[in-house]
């Protein structure tokens, strides 16, 4: 029994009593210990806390098997991105400025996972404050892609995607502001879902760009992602932007039936800049869905060309404001030798030492686009274009039930290859940022490998709160695709 077999299988052997939660947890911890030296996917592992929880679940089973059986993630080892607050483990968002920071509370998604019986085994590496597409801006160093250690796992939730791809855990949480769950999922050959804005609570997610941020699950299979979403979704009084919309049983939506589903394909976005193997694999995946009875329809998203500049104006503006709180007073680290006596110097030095280059670039851009004289030209304009991009989707969704594209224009690139060219790096997000700008749900599901053996992801966007439709499509495709090859020769 390994995490490669998925959350449901793990849960079932624990509930049946065939294996104890403690045994499963120990195995996961051993594998993390062995693999993390190569992958650098975890920034913290909470072995003692995890084993304590596993023993508590075993004790619960001894008292009442029914009580354990009521937990949808009973004994399932889970990892969470290091920008999600945890009381029992450090939370640094992979920034030096939060070195040593301990949150006094758990993020809502963390408590929900634990109430569902999941065991949080550790925190995963990510780009600093989730800003990046390659995991190279992390203060904890880059994550290595399990398919090729010289390559990026994608970002910013690179640690979560790599941990799932390497079968260290069956499910991990990421956050997605412009693609950070879906793009690393695609580059690591796993499934990643960004829910509708408001579907999942952001309470305890360290804010990057609050109008775009959502927490989302990553798993080996759609089934695990659906199971996790059923646990994570729902209203939270602690997050005023969380939705009251009823939470369906997402697992029950995975019927395999996509007959009559209309899939929009914006072909005009695929004319240039997409790797030929990526194009080929996504086209084949769509043909597979057509063979299952779905209809492929050509749709237009005329304003999509403006998505990247729009996103990088809004995201940096919000980031500049959100990151103003890191001043050496309230959270985390303070520059040595400074004090409240000389406040301005303390702020400056703390922020100078505490933030990395990419985060500083974003704060500078964000401050600029919000400054007097430029605000109307950049920020207000970007908000207007954001509305137009959302309108393109509304119009397209009058004709189709979902929109399909590749998740990323190219497979995993080499570490170091793009990190000194921010504009090139930002283009990795060309197919993912629109879902955030429009607040829509979107999933990335693996659809094969390039000729060089690197994973490719198919991206499916849905109408607001129609996660069931896109998960059903992704899972139906998965049935015909069959098992993805594993980056590990033993299949683990
Ligand atoms: N790559 C995008 C960025 O750098 C998205 C990041 C994210 O979704 N957190 O902003």
Image (cartoon, helix red, strand yellow):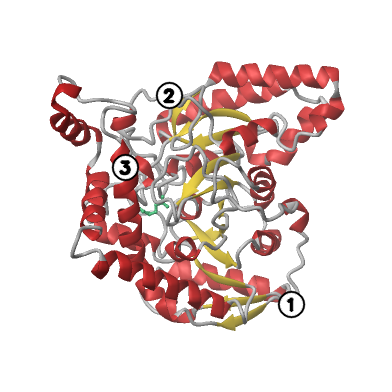
Question: Does dot 3 land on a helix, a strand or a loop?
Answer: helix
Q: What separation in Å lies between label 2 and label 3 (alpha carbons)?
A: 17 Å
- Marks counted in the figure total 3
| Label 2: element kind | loop
Crowd class of label 2 (few under 14; some 14 to 19; many from 20; radius 10 Å):
some
Q: Is 408 situated left or right of 377 in this image?
A: right
Write down the quadrant of residue 345 in the picture: top left
- Residue 243 horizontal/vertical position (percent): 61, 53
Q: Quadrant of residue 83?
A: top left
Do callouts 1 and 3 mark residues in contact (Cβ within 8 Å)?
no
Measure the C-alpha gap from mark 2 to mark 1: 50 Å
Residue placed at 25% from the left, 48% from the top? 363
Q: Which secondary structure lies at badge 1?
A: loop
**In this figure, which residue is indicated by the disc labeled 2?**
102
Discs 2/3, front: 3
Describe residue 411's horizontal placement relative to residue 27 as left or right: left
Disc 3: which residue: 323
Up-down relation of residue 436 to residue 381 (above or below): above
If you read the primary sequence from the N terminus, does the residue marked by circle 1 or circle 3 appear first?
Answer: 1
Proximity of marks 2 and 3: CB atoms separated by less than 8 Å: no
What x and y, as percent, mark residue 415?
31, 47
């Amino acid at each position: 029994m390994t995490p490669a077999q998925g959350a449901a299988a793990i849960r079932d052997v624990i509930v049946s009593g065939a294996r104890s939660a403690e045994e499963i947890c120990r195995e996961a911890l051993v594998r993390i210990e062995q693999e993390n030296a190569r992958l650098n996917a975890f920034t913290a592992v909470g072995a003692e806390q995890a084993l304590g929880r596993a023993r508590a679940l075993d004790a619960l089973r001894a008292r009442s098997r029914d009580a354990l059986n009521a937990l949808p993630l009973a004994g399932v080892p889970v990892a969470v991105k290091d920008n999600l607050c945890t009381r029992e483990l450090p939370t640094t968002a992979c920034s030096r400025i939060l070195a040593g920071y301990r949150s006094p509370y758990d993020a809502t998604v963390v408590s929900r996972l634990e109430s569902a019986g999941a065991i949080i085994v550790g925190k995963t590496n990510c780009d600093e404050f989730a800003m990046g597409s390659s995991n190279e801006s992390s203060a904890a160093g880059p994550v290595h892609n399990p398919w090729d250690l010289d390559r990026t796992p994608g970002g910013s939730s690179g640690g979560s995607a790599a941990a799932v791809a390497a079968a260290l855990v069956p499910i991990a949480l990421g956050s997605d502001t412009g693609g950070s769950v879906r793009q690393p999922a695609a580059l690591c050959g796993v499934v990643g879902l960004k829910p509708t804005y408001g579907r999942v609570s952001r309470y305890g997610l360290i804010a990057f760009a609050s109008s775009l941020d959502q927490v989302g699950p990553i798993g080996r299979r759609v089934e695990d992602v659906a199971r996790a979403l059923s646990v994570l979704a729902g209203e939270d009084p602690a997050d005023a932007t969380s939705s009251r919309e009823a939470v369906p049983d997402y697992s029950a939506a995975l019927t395999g039936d996509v007959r009559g589903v209309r899939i929009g394909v914006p072909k005009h976005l695929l004319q240039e800049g997409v790797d030929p193997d990526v194009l080929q694999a996504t086209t084949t995946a769509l043909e597979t869905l057509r063979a299952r009875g779905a209809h492929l329809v050509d749709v237009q998203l005329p304003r999509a060309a403006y998505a990247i500049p729009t996103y990088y104006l809004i995201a940096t503006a919000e980031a500049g404001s959100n990151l103003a709180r890191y001043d050496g007073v309230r959270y985390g680290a303070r520059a040595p030798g400074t004090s409240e006596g000389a406040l301005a110097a303390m702020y400056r030095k703390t922020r100078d030492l505490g933030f990395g280059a990419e985060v500083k670039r974003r704060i500078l851009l964000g401050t600029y686009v919000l400054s007097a004289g430029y605000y109307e030209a950049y920020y207000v304009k970007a908000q207007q274009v954001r509305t137009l991009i959302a309108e393109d989707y509304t119009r397209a969704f009058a004709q189709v039930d979902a929109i399909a594209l590749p998740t990323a224009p190219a497979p995993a690139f080499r570490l170091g290859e793009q990190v000194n060219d921010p504009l090139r790096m930002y283009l990795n997000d060309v197919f993912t940022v629109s879902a955030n700008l429009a607040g829509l749900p979107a999933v990335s599901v693996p659809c094969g490998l390039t000729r060089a053996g690197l994973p490719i992801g198919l991206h499916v966007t849905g109408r607001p709160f129609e996660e069931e439709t896109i998960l059903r499509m992704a899972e139906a495709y998965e049935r015909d695709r069959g098992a993805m090859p594993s980056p590990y020769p033993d299949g683990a």
